[in-house]
Image (tube, grey):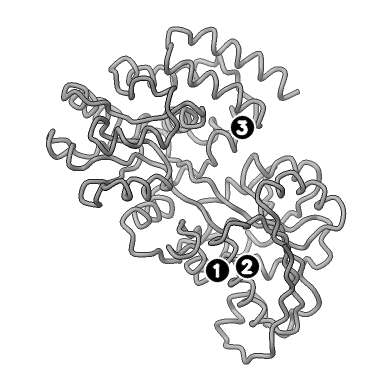
């Protein structure tokens, strides 16, 4: 789907000029944008934001091409190589790495040197950095954490845990009450990746986690084993939903709704179906995954969508102005609103809809995650390694005594995949 937007001449406010980073009179010529936002709400959101950018820059000819999300994944390398657009959306961290290494994304470290971006988008800088340089800007993300039944916690006299010992003590009381501590559906593997992410980030820190994702650390390293040891403490307590390997993440939700499980480590996308199933905001609450190693700064999983300037772009100055506009506080607030993307703005000066969980997530990611933002296991690890590893993670949850064999298998895969 392609549409071309040419704005009429409009009077411009000083605020509008500042939002783009340059005065509108300086933006002339063309701007070609490729997007994968083909679903109705994201598409309408992006079309509206681009239209407003066009109104602010009436001498700029903007051509936007919207490609089906799945087709985009297979086409991106081709269109970055030939007939490149000026702006393309994608994902942070390891998902952008192949295009950085192939020289297909522009270094935009100059944008990150600007105070408005450097200060207000600081939480995601690590996710946008490869080889000490930044290769795009983020426009939306969402939090992960532990969603829990507050009414069950109140019944058992529990409070939100601040550290690992309190987490385990809570779990012991929950199991004693006849419930599972954690709902999880690992049939499609990736949910087990979320548990490994948080346990490893809290045990060894963001830098170690990313070094492991980049193939620089052995899976048989004692520090990795320590992560699994922490995980086994919960497994041996009977903390996880039985037969979780038989359920998808959605199929595990009823156990939490019915009160058979007290919490769920999951992304904010689970809130809507939990509400639709009948849980009220008085029953449902959220807390940040607790501290394990007090010497490690807190880092979070927050999958991040991004804008990039292809290295073959013809209108890079216009593209930079568009990136500045899309990460500005006002635009971030608008595009991430509940009737738009319904996610979190990355800009710390933005505001969020009056939603309990979006507000908690925004505060956590903007102010309480000094250790950095990871992208989630199957985004941070190369696809082939992620598949093999997540199979091993699910196996460990079911058969923890197999750990040595699992780690040996993953280490063998590391030697093959990262060559």
How much space separates mark 3 and mark 2, taking CA atoms?
A: 29 Å
Tell me the residue that label 1 is attached to: 328
- Figure check: 405 above or below 286: above
Q: Report the Cα–Cα distance between label 2 and label 1.
A: 6 Å
Query: Where is mark 2, residue-wise?
Result: 324
Residue depicted at x 71% and y 23%: 417
Image x and y of residue 161, in percent: 25, 36
Tell me the SS state at disc 1.
loop
297 sits to left or right of 13: left
- The secondary element bearing badge 2 is classed as helix
Residue under numbered circle 3? 381
Q: Disc 3 versus disc 1: distance between alpha carbons? A: 30 Å
Residue 364: horizontal and vertical position, in percent? Answer: 38, 50
Mark 3 crowdedness (10 Å alpha carbons): few <14, some 14-19, many ≥20: many
Q: Can you tell which quarter of the image residue 292 is in?
A: top left
Q: Residues within 10 Å of mark 2 (few under 14, many from 20)?
A: many
Residue 203, placed above or below residue 236: below
Q: Are marks 2 and 1 in contact (CB under 8 Å)?
A: yes
Q: Where is residue 243 shown, x and y percent of the image? A: 38, 20
Q: State which mark lies toward you, 3 or 1.
A: 3
The front one of 345 and 3 is 3
Please state which of the two labelled residues, at mark 3 or mark 2, is closer to the viewer.
3
**Residue contact between numbered discs 3 and 1, judged by CB atoms under 8 Å:** no
Quadrant the C terminus occupies: top right
């Amino acid at each position: 789907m392609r549409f071309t937007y040419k704005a009429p001449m409009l009077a411009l406010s000083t605020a509008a000029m500042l939002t783009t980073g340059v005065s509108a009179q300086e933006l002339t010529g063309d701007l070609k944008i490729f997007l994968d936002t083909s679903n109705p709400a994201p598409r309408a959101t992006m079309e509206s934001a681009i239209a407003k950018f066009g109104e602010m820059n009436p001498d700029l000819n903007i051509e936007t091409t919207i490609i089906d999300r799945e087709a985009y994944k297979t086409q991106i390398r081709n269109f970055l190589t030939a007939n490149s657009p000026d702006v393309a959306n994608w994902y942070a961290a390891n998902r952008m790495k192949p295009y950085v290494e192939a020289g297909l994304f522009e270094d935009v470290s100059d944008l990150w040197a600007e105070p408005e971006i450097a200060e207000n988008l600081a939480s995601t800088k690590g996710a946008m950095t490869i080889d000490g340089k930044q290769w795009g800007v983020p426009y939306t993300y969402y939090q992960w954490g532990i969603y829990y039944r507050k009414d069950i916690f109140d019944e058992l006299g529990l409070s939100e845990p601040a550290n690992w010992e309190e987490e385990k003590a809570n779990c012991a009381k929950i199991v004693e009450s006849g419930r599972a501590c954690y709902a999880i559906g690992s049939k499609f593997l990736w949910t087990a990746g979320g548990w490994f992410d948080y346990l490893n980030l809290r045990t060894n820190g963001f830098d170690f986690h990313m070094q492991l994702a980049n193939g620089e650390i052995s899976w048989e390293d004692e520090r990795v084993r320590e992560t699994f040891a922490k995980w086994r403490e919960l497994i041996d307590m009977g903390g996880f939903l039985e037969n979780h390997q038989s359920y998808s993440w959605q199929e595990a939700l009823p156990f939490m709704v019915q009160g058979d499980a007290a919490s769920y480590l999951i992304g904010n996308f689970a809130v809507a179906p939990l509400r639709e199933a009948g849980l009220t905001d008085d029953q449902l609450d959220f807390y940040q995954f607790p501290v394990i190693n007090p010497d490690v700064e807190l880092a979070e999983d927050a999958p991040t969508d991004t804008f990039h300037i292809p290295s073959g772009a013809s209108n890079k100055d216009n593209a930079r102005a568009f990136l500045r506009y899309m990460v500005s506080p006002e635009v971030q607030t608008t595009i991430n609103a509940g009737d738009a993307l319904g996610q979190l703005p990355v800009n710390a000066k933005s505001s969020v809809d009056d939603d309990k969980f979006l507000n908690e997530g925004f505060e956590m990611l903007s102010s309480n995650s000094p250790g950095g933002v990871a992208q989630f296991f199957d985004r941070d690890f190369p696809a082939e390694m992620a598949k093999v590893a997540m199979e091993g993670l699910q196996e460990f949850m079911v058969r923890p005594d197999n750990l040595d064999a699992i780690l040996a298998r993953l280490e063998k895969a590391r030697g093959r995949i990262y060559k």
